[in-house]
Amino acid sequence: MKLISVISPSVSLSELSLICQAQDIILLRQDAVYLCLRTDLSWPCPLYALDVDIQVRQITPLAAVTVISAQRWVELSISAEQNVLWQN
């Protein structure tokens, strides 16, 4: 499993989907959590968002988004075979 952290809301899903497999996880962080509000996007693997970033921005994510704590993020990072920071 790869843990792919996305930090920018201007992500290219077509490029991102090239490195994703079904067992991978995409974690939205920082301003990328605004993507939790988009109903027009189809993500290539499960979508998570960091709770502190959601709370700071006062948004309510879609039901398909799993909201996780910083502690859970650390656990996922440890268990992942690869950690990727996606910045574009």
Image: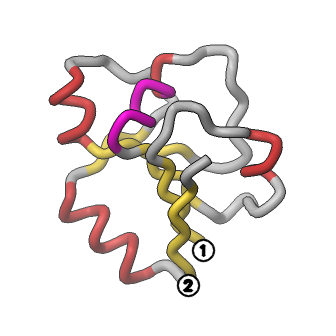
Q: Is residue 14 left or right of residue 1?
A: right
Which residue has dot 2 on it? 81
Kindly state the secondary structure of the residue where label 1 is placed. Answer: loop
Q: Position of residue 14 (x, y in %)?
A: 82, 42
Q: Is residue 35 above or below residue 79?
A: above
Q: Is residue 35 left or right of residue 55?
A: right
Start-end of magenta stretch: 30-35
> Mark 1 is on which residue type?
Met
> Mark 2 is on which residue type?
Glu
At a point 30% along the width and 45% down the height, the residue shown is: 50
Kindly state the secondary structure of the residue where label 2 is placed. Answer: loop
- Could you tell me how many numbered marks the image carries? 2
Q: State which quadrant residue 74 falls in.
A: bottom left
Which residue has dot 1 on it? 1
Which label belongs to residue 16?
none
Q: Was residue 20 drawn as part of the magenta stretch in this picture?
A: no
